[in-house]
């Protein structure tokens, strides 16, 4: 069983417009409204791949009720931890030949008392549902910069050996989990911008990322750095890979990173070889980018894309 945790979900408003200008009145067509957040998108994509998923989210206020109502039609199981503050909103505008603009609220803050509630709830679910894979997706709005480090340590102590832990978050949380953790997750998936934040360096293309990791291996067993249209760089089990994604007609990239994580979870769940984990991850992320919606990895599309993912070992 798979548990996907979203500690800062959102209600997303998606707009597709030919142009968008700052400082003036913009009149848009009606938005597409979705219950989202990185873990929700990942849960949806993994469900499209045919896996049973339990999603755990932190929700509050009227927006939280709206969020829960929207998830009633999803095919994955949704569990919630209530919080007093309002669940956040996120606005995505696709405009001017696939320029991608986002406006994202910070979301409700997690206090120390709520941290214990969250840990206890996760342990209860893991124990009752025999969870094999846990994915920590997205930010947590907390003054505690060690929040995710503490959660991974907690999970390592409380779960069975061999439980896979995936971490899909960025900024300080990612820096802490890579550079200062006593227990590591099994998998991370920064994009190239997040990899710049992680290292404190500037990378302009996939080759620069590849050259850096070759000289500076990361401590995470499975690291996948997505590089947009260029594909990705993977460091899996000590082996470095140059990955080229299939060429597609881009519709909407929002949620592609989350679908990439879903593809990796699917492959881990089925105990596939490392190169197949990469293949499913990239194919799932690519499939999502071909859709108007968010967190959509249709199985037939993913299967069609698998053989078009080019993976080259780097010695």
Image (cartoon, helix red, strand yellow):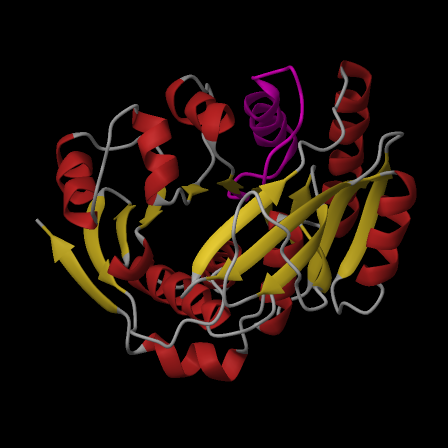
Q: Magenta residues?
A: 138-165
Which of 151 and 102 lies nearest the eye of the viewer?
A: 102
Which of 224 and 129 lies nearest the eye of the viewer?
A: 224
The x and y percentages for residue 250 are: 41, 71
Q: Is residue 241 above or below residue 162?
A: below
Q: Please identify the residue farthest to the left as the structure is shown.
A: 315
Q: Residue at x 43, y 62 (%)?
A: 96
Q: Does residue 53 appear in the picture of this structure?
A: yes
Q: Is residue 253 above or below residue 137?
A: below
Q: Does residue 50 appear in the picture of this structure?
A: no
Q: Residue at x 28, y 32 (%)?
A: 218
Quarter of the view holding residue 15: bottom right
Q: Residue at x 64, y 52 (%)?
A: 25
Which of 49 and 208 lies nearest the eye of the viewer?
A: 208
- In the shown orientation, is residue 194 left or right of residue 108? left
Q: Residue at x 43, y 43 (%)?
A: 187
The x and y percentages for residue 136 are: 59, 40
Name the quarter where the N terminus is drawn. bottom right
Q: Please identify the residue farthest to the front as the structure is shown.
A: 24
Quarter of the view holding residue 196: top left
Magenta-span inclusion, residue 143: yes
The x and y percentages for residue 167 are: 51, 39
The x and y percentages for residue 82 are: 88, 36
């Amino acid at each position: 069983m798979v548990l996907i945790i979203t500690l800062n979900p959102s209600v997303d408003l998606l707009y597709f417009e030919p142009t968008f200008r700052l400082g003036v009145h913009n009149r848009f067509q009606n938005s597409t409204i979705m219950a989202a957040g990185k873990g929700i998108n990942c849960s949806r994509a993994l469900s499209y791949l045919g896996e049973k998923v339990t999603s755990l989210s932190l929700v509050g206020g009227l927006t939280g009720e709206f969020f829960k109502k929207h998830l009633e039609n999803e095919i994955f199981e949704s569990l919630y931890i209530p919080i007093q503050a309002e669940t956040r909103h996120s606005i995505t505008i696709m405009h001017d030949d696939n320029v991608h603009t986002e406006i994202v609220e910070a979301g409700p803050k997690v206090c120390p008392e709520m941290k214990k509630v969250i840990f206890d709830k996760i342990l209860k679910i893991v124990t009752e549902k025999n969870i094999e894979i846990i994915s920590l997706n997205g930010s947590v709005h907390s003054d505690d910069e060690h929040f995710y480090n503490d959660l991974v340590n907690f999970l390592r102590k409380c779960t069975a050996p061999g439980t896979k832990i995936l971490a899909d978050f960025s900024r300080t949380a990612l820096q802490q989990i890579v550079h200062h953790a006593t227990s590591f997750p099994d998998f991370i998936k920064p994009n190239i911008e997040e990899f710049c934040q992680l290292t404190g360096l500037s990378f302009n293309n996939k080759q620069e990322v590849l050259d850096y990791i070759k000289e500076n291996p990361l401590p995470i067993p499975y690291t996948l750095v997505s590089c947009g249209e260029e594909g990705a760089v993977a460091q899996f089990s000590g082996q470095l890979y140059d990955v080229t994604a299939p060429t597609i007609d881009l519709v909407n990239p929002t949620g592609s990173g989350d679908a990439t994580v879903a593809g990796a979870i699917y492959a881990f769940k089925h105990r596939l070889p490392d190169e197949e984990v990469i293949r499913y991850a990239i194919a799932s992320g690519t499939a999502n980018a071909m859709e108007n919606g968010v967190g959509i990895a249709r199985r037939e599309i993913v299967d069609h894309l698998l053989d078009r993912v080019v993976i080259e070992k780097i010695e």
